[in-house]
Amino acid sequence: MSRSLFAAGLAVGVVAASAAAAAGPSGAEIFENGAPSGAPACSACHGADGHGSDDGQFPAIAGLDAAYLAKQIADFKAGRRANDTMAPIAEMLTDAEVAAVTAQIAAMPPAPPKGEGSKAGDAIAKVGRWDLGVPGCESCHGVGGAGAGAHFPALAGQKAAYIVAQFGEWRSGKRNNDPLGLMKSVADRLDDADLAAVAAHFEAARR
Ligand code: HEC
Ligand code: HEC
């Protein structure tokens, strides 16, 4: 194939791909009004801004990495993360809907900081508790809890009560989706006072 024919072929491919994307579900539409598959509007629980609820029942999801979000939806579907509310919704979403809505959520501004934070929590975030075998959270979750790629979600601005609840899920095995058991080992070793402190620290951190 000559170079110009090859380029023309590529151009046709690109046009076809963007036409398919345009015909698919819109991420914003799914987030605000629900999906064609019947999955309900994400905003109904996660908030119109995707900032979650202060009681920690609904996590802040705005601005989290798209691939991390898609992995969580796959984990709910597969039962690696058990939750009676979110799992049935994940099961409804088609692959195209997941791709569209996770791109939308990732592009939304993250939740702003809230509360006083905690000095003790800040130390646990940065240096950990090596006497208990717990590394600093930031060594995986990025400086300031800003997140690192698809595998380590941002924690800054996340609801403290949700962070505490997830540690309970790992300890009990209801959340069993962390690569190499990295979070299960942290959750099992950190005590509740340190957990409360580090959770308050991250809720008050700005991303
Ligand atoms: C009826 C309420 C409800 C609706 C509607 C809802 N969710 Fe959720 N979602 C939850 C709950 C509750 C959790 C926390 C589950 C847990 O504690 O493990 C959650 C957790 C999540 C998580 C994991 C977040 C994280 O930080 O790991 C993702 C991703 C998610 N939801 C995406 C969505 C998307 C996308 C939609 C819209 C298609 C949606 N949710 C609609 C209740 C809801
Ligand atoms: C050795 C690496 C590592 C360390 C250290 C670590 N984490 Fe994690 N953490 C992970 C991974 C990996 C995930 C994502 C698991 C998954 O795929 O669901 C995660 C997920 C989380 C989540 C779930 C976020 C969400 O949106 O649902 C919370 C909360 C969390 N970590 C808190 C902490 C805290 C607090 C500390 C410090 C005490 C900490 N982590 C230390 C690797 C780590």
Image (tube, grey):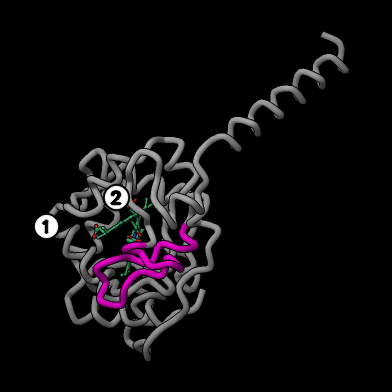
Prevailing secondary structure of the magenta residues: loop
Q: Going 33% across and 46% down the picture, which residue do you hit? A: 39
> In this rendering, would 122 be left or right of 188?
right
Q: Does 93 appear above or below 190?
A: above
In front: 169, or 53? 53
Q: Give the x, y percent position of residue 207.
A: 51, 73
Image quadrant where one finds the N terminus: top right
Q: Going 82% across and 21% down the picture, which residue do you hit? A: 7
Q: Is mark 2 within 8 Å of ligand 2?
A: yes
What is the secondary structure assignment of the residue under circle 1? helix
| Label of residue 29 in the image | none
Crowding around mark 1 (Cα neighbors within 10 Å: few <14, some 14 to 19, many 20+) is few
Q: Going 46% across and 49% down the picture, which residue do you hit? A: 101
| Label of residue 172 in the image | 1
What is the secondary structure assignment of the residue under circle 2? loop
Residue range of the region highlighted in magenta in the rendering: 44-64
Q: Going 46% across and 68% down the picture, which residue do you hit? A: 49
Q: Please say whether residue 8 is one of the residues in the magenta stretch.
A: no
Read off the residue under disc 2.
178
> In this rendering, would 64 be left or right of 60?
right
In front: 72, or 21? 21
Q: Does 3 appear above or below 75?
A: above
